[in-house]
Amino acid sequence: MIVLKGGLCVDPESATEDIRDIFIEGDKISDIREPSDSMDKYLKDEHITGLYDCSDLIIGPGIVDAHVHFRDPGFTHKEDIITGAMAAARGGVTSVIMMANTKPAIDNTDTLKYVLEKGRQTGIHVYSSATVTKGLKGEELTDMAALKEAGAVAFTDDGIPILMEDIARKAMEMAAECKTILSFHEENPEYIDNNGINRGKASAYYGLGGSDRMAEISMVERDIRLAGETGANINIQHISTAEAVELIRQAKAEGMDDIIHAEATPHHLSMTEDDIIRYGTNAKMNPPLRTPADRDAIIQGLVDGTIECIATDHAPHAFDEKNQPIDKAPSGIIGLETSLAVSYNALVATKKLSLLQLFCKMSLNPARIYKINAGQLAIYRMADLVIFDPKKIHYFKESRSKSFNSPLANTRITGDVIGTISSGEFVYDNMAERRLK
């Protein structure tokens, strides 16, 4: 038995936040008690094999990251499912949903079964999406019913927008029939000349055309309309513009709250286009970092419930791929190991969100939207937990990922995950100084 003693325990499902002792037996939480003053009792209990002092620490349900790229199969020089899961564990993430833009793409049951089987070899819970269209070509729909039956929890052509409206409509009709969710990458190339850089201050700095905000706005507007007409359950990925936030807010106000969902990344809620000027290609991403007003609108969307989830869009790239001129380097950054600290500092430390609200965005809500068993910290629930020290200062000098393409690389970060438990076992353990037994 493992006992985590005296931590601030946060359960978003029951909306409780208290100092408690947590008991873990097997893969479940067996008990949650008011903190005991009798340390000798714990030390003498032969059933307790691991006793940890968690005073001044936050214990929450393991993070559920609904948007990660593990690059497997096809791009395993950047990442694979094993190393991706290791990076997730380092960041307190116990459940992930992989994107399907691999090579071959996850558009068939054989590839889906391969990635799910490899995911079972990790210490965390690895789920996968499948593509909406065959070969990510935006032309012919996949067999959603068969793929869902084989284990796909969502469908997305993430990385490539679905440009043909009739295909998007048919996809939504099929998703509604299959009772599954579609997740949309919203960037219309008609408004883009050199993606990954906001059209404005950043594009002017680099002398490039950049990505106009209408690239996102136009497609969010279209897909909300189509969802309303078809009744499809959709998620708008990695929101980057204030206008897109407002479109989603209006749709929810008009009664579409059950079918329109949205996610924000830690980088879009904490950074602006000034950061791509500062950090170069390690802050280049699709959609790009935009203005302070856009960042503030995303935060407000999280505060008022317009945006329900925080997801990293963890996108590893090798050093030589990122170490190119800004217009040549690929878009994307890693984020699994830093997402909780970044989100905590941007939202909780600034009193914009409570701890309960943060764990709703990072654990409970994505679990509910994608219908996976996660996001709770309660008796008899799966023992998937993150142990977070909000005051610990560390330098992000290395990554468990194969790649290190992050604007936070080699920077000082306040707040750190010191323990991650998945199915009752430590998958990341930096708690030697806290171990009492």
Image (spheres, rainbow, N blue to C red):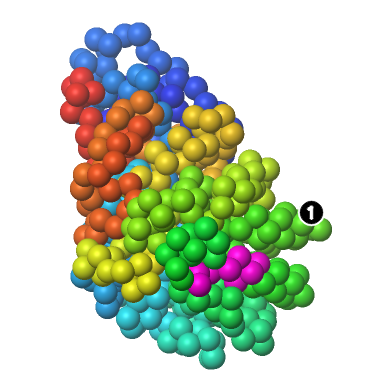
Task: Reply above or below: 54 against 317.
Answer: above
User: Is residue 425 visible from the viewing direction of this image?
Assistant: no
In magenta, the rendered stretch is 209-217
Taking 266 as reference, is 245 left or right? right
Number of marks drawn: 1
Q: Residue 235, located in which quarter of the rendered image?
A: bottom right
In the image, 101 versus 143, the foreground residue is: 101
Q: Position of residue 98 (x, y in %)?
A: 39, 65
The quadrant of the picture occupied by the N terminus is top left
Q: Residue 401, located in which quarter of the rendered image?
A: bottom left
Residue at the image point whose x is 49% and y is 38% from the top: 346
The quadrant of the picture occupied by the C terminus is top left
Other residues around mark 1 within 10 Å, as few (<14) / some (14–19) / many (≥20): few
Residue at the image point whose x is 26% and y is 74% from the top: 75
Q: Position of residue 29 (x, y in %)?
A: 39, 36
Q: Residue 237, located in which quarter of the rendered image?
A: bottom right
Magenta stretch: includes residue 370? no
Task: Reply above or below: 36 against 363.
Answer: above
In the image, 274 versus 320, the foreground residue is: 274
The residue sitting at the bottom extreme is 140
Residue at the image point whose x is 36% and y is 26% from the top: 391
Q: Position of residue 11 (x, y in %)?
A: 51, 34
Task: Reply above or below: 412 against 248.
Answer: above
Taking 182 as reference, is 50 left or right? left
Residue at the image point whose x is 48% and y is 64% from the top: 203
User: Is residue 240 visible from the viewing direction of this image?
Assistant: yes
Which residue is identified by label 1? 253
Give, as a three-letter code, the residue at label 1.
Ala
Taking 188 as reference, is 246 left or right? right
